[in-house]
Image (cartoon, rainbow, N blue to C red):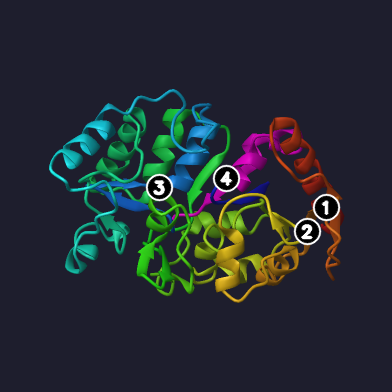
Amino acid sequence: MVTFLSGGTGTPKLLTGAEASFEPEEMTVVANTGDDVMLGGFLVCPDVDTVLFLGGDALDRETWWGIADDTAKTHDRLQELAEAVDLGTGPRYLDEAAQTAGRDIAAWRRFSSVGEFMYIGDRDRAVHLTRTGLLDEGHSLTEATEILAEAYDIPWTLLPMSDDPVASLIETPDGTMHFQEFWVARNGEPAVESVDFRGGESATPTTAVFDALAEPVVIGPSNPVTSIGPMLALDGFEDALESTTVVAVSPFVEDEVFSGPAAKLMDAQGYEPSTAGMAAAYPFADGFVLDTDDGTTLSRPTVRTDTEIAGESDAARVSRAVRALLDELQ
């Protein structure tokens, strides 16, 4: 058995070739939920859904978001209506009182549907509405995810990191904004002063997640701050990682990041934006997979390969390096 920690696109890309080294029925994927938002009344779980759609062979692999060849008639019409009366299509937070009213799982991340700043396809929307309906019927997020995973017939076990709300909030000179505003609406351009995982101090992993963390753990080349950081903010999560074997794949080649805002976010959190900084952010990791062009020297075991993942054959190559290091460490 092996457990993958997943957020953003790094770990999902690794999963495309993981079957080269791991049996799917022996894999559990724990997905970040700090990026989740309540948008116009339905819960969007971007990192959960990337893994869900990937496992169901439905993911748009051009964007690594949403469903391939999806239509977006509802989304387009929402934007047309907003523009017709000059309401704009930027993020519209519900007021402060509304942020903690209603569904607990949606706390601190509630947006109006006016203008719908996030692109939501029609079939994608059906997933969000089904998930939200299941929550309203009394199911936990874990249970709702299991039901959706069955509908998509995914080959591995998929777990949200918690059934409790945790919101990744970015502190900028322009004020506090949810990660989705920072990354989707503002293209990651605002300066970052710090990152707050609101709710992390009281949220806990589920029993299923703790059971998964008792197995060897793989952290793909995901953003250490906003993809993995929300998980580490949960009570007991990092302690569990200290007690098992953990291998992490660097999203950097020395100080060059493959994609996304990891460098800016790590710098804001006091970590050097580099492979060395990634290792410092993961003190519980027992070993690392680094790129062959990465000259960083670490005090823990390393395996080197070409870590750029542009397709399934690349992912299989990195997966084999991960497997080799896990076998060496166990």
Amino acid at circle 4: Thr
Label 4–label 1 contact, CB within 8 A: no
Residue extent of the magenta highlight: 10-33
Judge by depth and name the residue closer to the eye, 190 or 71. Answer: 190
Spatial CA span between label 1 and label 2: 8 Å
Amino acid at circle 3: Cys
Q: Which mark is residue 325?
A: 1
Relative to residue 45, is residue 74 drawn left or right?
A: left
Spatial CA span between label 3 and label 4: 14 Å
Amino acid at circle 2: Phe
Task: Give the residue pinned by disc 2.
Answer: 288
Label 1–label 2 contact, CB within 8 A: yes
Within-10-Å neighbours for mark 1: few <14, some 14–19, many 20+: many
Upstream in the sequence, badge 2 or badge 3?
Answer: 3
Within-10-Å neighbours for mark 2: few <14, some 14–19, many 20+: many
User: Residue at the spot x=76%, y=46% of the render?
Assistant: 307
Within-10-Å neighbours for mark 3: few <14, some 14–19, many 20+: many
User: Residue at the spot x=71%, y=64% of the render?
Assistant: 274
Relative to residue 254, is residue 182 drawn left or right?
A: left
Q: Regarding mark 2 in the picture, which secondary structure is present there?
A: strand
Relative image position of residue 158 (x, y in whole percent) = 51, 43
Please say if 203 is above or below 149. Answer: below
Amino acid at circle 1: Leu
